[in-house]
Image (cartoon, grey):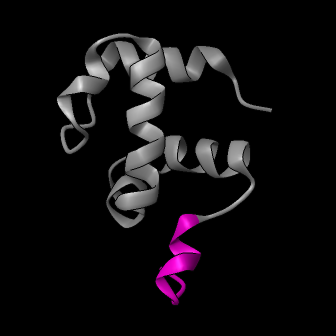
Amino acid sequence: MVNANRVKFAYQMRHLLFIHEYGATNEAEYFAVLTETSIEKPVELKQENPELFNLLVSYFRFDPRDWLGRAV
C-alpha cells in the first residue's frame, strides 16, 4: 500500500531536480509528473531516490525498467 504521507513529503521537499518543474505546482501535478518521470527516466529516478521509485513500482505493480529490455 502506498503511503500518501511519503509522497506528500517528497513533494514538499522537491528534491528531485531532474523532473519537470511543473510538478511543483501542487500535489496532484507532482504525482503526475513523477509518474511520467518514472516511466521516461526509470534508471535516473531509481538512482536519485530508490525509495520513491520502489514506492511507485509497488503502487503501479510494474517496473518500467523492464521495458528497457534489461535488468538495471
**Horizontal arrangement in the rendering, residue 56 relative to residue 41 (left or right):** right
Residue drawn 28% across and 13% down?
A: 25
56 vs 6: above or below: below
Residues rendered magenta in the picture: 64-72
When asked about the image quadrant of residue 34, the answer is: top left
Q: How many marks?
A: 0
Q: Residue at x 40, y 21 (%)?
A: 29
Q: Which residue is at a point 69% across and 61% down the rendered structure image?
A: 62
Q: Is residue 14 visible?
A: no
x and y percent of residue 10 in the render?
A: 42, 23
Left or right of residue 55, residue 1 in this image? right
Q: Residue at x 32, y 50 (%)?
A: 48
Q: Horizontal placement of 62 versus 44: left or right?
A: right
Find the residue positioned furthest to the bottom: 69
| Nearer to me, 36 or 9 | 36
**x, y (%) of residue 18?**
20, 45
Tell me residue 35's x, y (percent).
Answer: 48, 42
| Residue 32 lies in the magenta stretch | no
Image: 11 above or below 20: above
Residue 43, given in percent of the width and then of the height, sits at: 38, 66
In depth, the one of 39 and 49 nearer the eye is 39
Query: Viewed as shown, does residue 30 lie left or right of 28?
Result: left
| Quadrant position of residue 33 | top left
Give yes or no for residue 69 being in the magenta stretch. yes
